[in-house]
Amino acid sequence: MRALKSREKISFDGDVEADDTLVAYSEKGSRKISDRNPKKNGTKYTQMENKKVLLLVVVDHNNHLFLEASSAKNTYVTSICNSLGDLVSKEAKFCSNFKTFYKHFAKLKGIEHHFRVSLYHNTVENNIDLAYGHRKAVENWFYRFQGVASKYLNNYLALYNCLRKNNLDKTAIGVTNFLKALSFVNIKESYKSIRTLKLI
C-alpha cells in the first residue's frame, strides 16, 4: 500500500467536484498513547473533540479521483493548496460544498468556483453528486476494517483507488486475484512496477 500511495501525475480539468468529511483521529494498534488512558472496546474520539482528520475527495468527469486524509494541524486552506495546487487546472470549473476553505483555495489559484449550499440547492453549475457518491463509497469501504489507524489512512485510500480503477472493488474474486498478482512482485520493485502489474 505504501507503493501504491506514490500517486501518478494527474491533472483535473473541465468540471471538477470536491467534497470532504471529518473522521475521528485513531491510534489503533499503538502500544503507547501519551495523551489519554487506554479505552476498552475501541472507543473512538467524538467529532466534537480536537483531534480530527480531514478526508478530501476530488473528482472530475474523466474518471480521475484524488483521495487524501490530512491532519487538521495546519489550516484546511494550507492542506488543500498543498494537495491540489498543482493538480487542478486554472481552466477548470471547480465546485464544492459551502465550506469557506474551498472558496479561499479557488481565489488563491484563480479558478472559477461554484458551491452547493445544500442538497436542495443543486443545479448543473453547483453539482457535487459525483464527489459525494465517491465519498460515501469510501466511507462504506472503510467499515469492513473496523477502524484504521490515522497514520495508515492514505495507504488504504491508495489501495481503494487502485481497486476502483481495475474494477476489482465489487467482487471477492477480483480482490483475490489482485492479492495473488501482488504475491509475484519483488518487494524491492518500485511503485511503477506494481501499477503496471498485469492482474490475472
Image: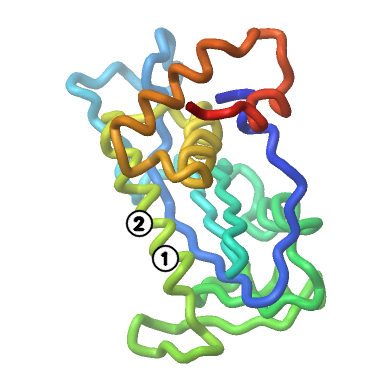
Q: Nearer the viewer, residue 2 or 47?
A: 2
Residue 141 pos. (x, y %)? 33, 42
Residue at the front extreme of this rendering? 200
Amino acid type of disc 1? Answer: Tyr
The image quarter containing residue 45 is top left
Element type at mark 1: helix
* Left or right of 39 in this view: 105: right
Measured in 3D between alpha carbons, the distance from the residue under mark 2 to the one under mark 1, in whole angstroms, is 6 Å
Residue 14 pos. (x, y %)? 69, 76
The image quarter containing residue 25 is top left
* Left or right of 150 in this view: 185: right
* Left or right of 161 in this view: 32: left
Q: Given contact means CB atoms under 8 Å apart, are the residues at marks 2 and 1 in contact?
A: yes
| Quarter placement of the N terminus | top right
Amino acid type of disc 2? Answer: Lys
Residue 20 pos. (x, y %)? 48, 59
How many residues crowd mark 2 within 10 Å: few (<14), some (14–19), many (20+)? Answer: few
Element type at mark 2: helix
Which colour scheme appears in the figure? rainbow
The image quarter containing residue 24 is top left
Residue at 62% in and 65% down: 62
Q: Nearer the viewer, residue 72 or 145?
A: 145
* Left or right of 95 in this view: 27: left
Determine which residue is flagged by label 1. 132
How many residues crowd mark 1 within 10 Å: few (<14), some (14–19), many (20+)? Answer: many
Instruction: Determine whether 125 is above or below 189 in the image.
Output: below
Residue at 58% in and 77% down: 95
Residue at 53% in and 71% down: 99
Determine which residue is flagged by label 2. 136
Residue 128 pos. (x, y %)? 48, 74
Instruction: Determine whether 58 is above or below 170 in the image.
Output: below
